[in-house]
Image (spheres, rainbow, N blue to C red):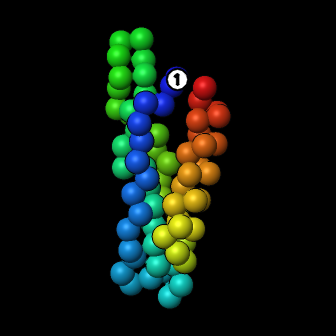
Amino acid sequence: MKVVDYEILVQDLIPPIGGVLKYYAGIQFLVVETPEGNKRINPNLGETYGKTSEEARDKMQEKFDNWIKQNT
């Protein structure tokens, strides 16, 4: 499976979880190359949380990278 495109979406949490986790991130979309052509799939990775938008994004990127390793 080859990843063609994906996007990690980060949004504010209002109110913050526990007063400190102010951001969450998730996979907005994932497109992979298949023998039949490009296909949009849902990796079902859930969400990650962070005190900063960068922390939330980095956690989701790590989760996504691990998912790719397990599924290729």
Can the viewer see residue 49 in this picture?
no
Name the residue that disc number 1 marks.
Answer: 1
Quarter holding residue 26: bottom left
**How would you rate the neighbour count of disc 1 (Cα within 10 Å): few for under 14, some for 14-19, many for 20 or more?**
few
- 20 above or below 63? below
Q: Amino acid at mark 1?
A: Met
User: Going by the image, does 72 lie left or right of 2?
Assistant: right
Q: Position of residue 18 (x, y in %)?
A: 52, 85
Q: Element at badge 1?
A: loop
Q: Position of residue 57 (x, y in %)?
A: 51, 60
Identity of the residue furthest to the bottom in this view: 19
Identity of the residue furthest to the top in this view: 35
- 46 above or below 5? below
Quarter holding residue 29: top left
- 16 above or below 53? below
Q: Position of residue 72 (x, y in %)?
A: 60, 26
- 2 above or below 17? above
Give the residue at x 53% y 67%: 54
Give the residue at x 38% y 68%: 11
Can the viewer see residue 64 in this picture?
yes
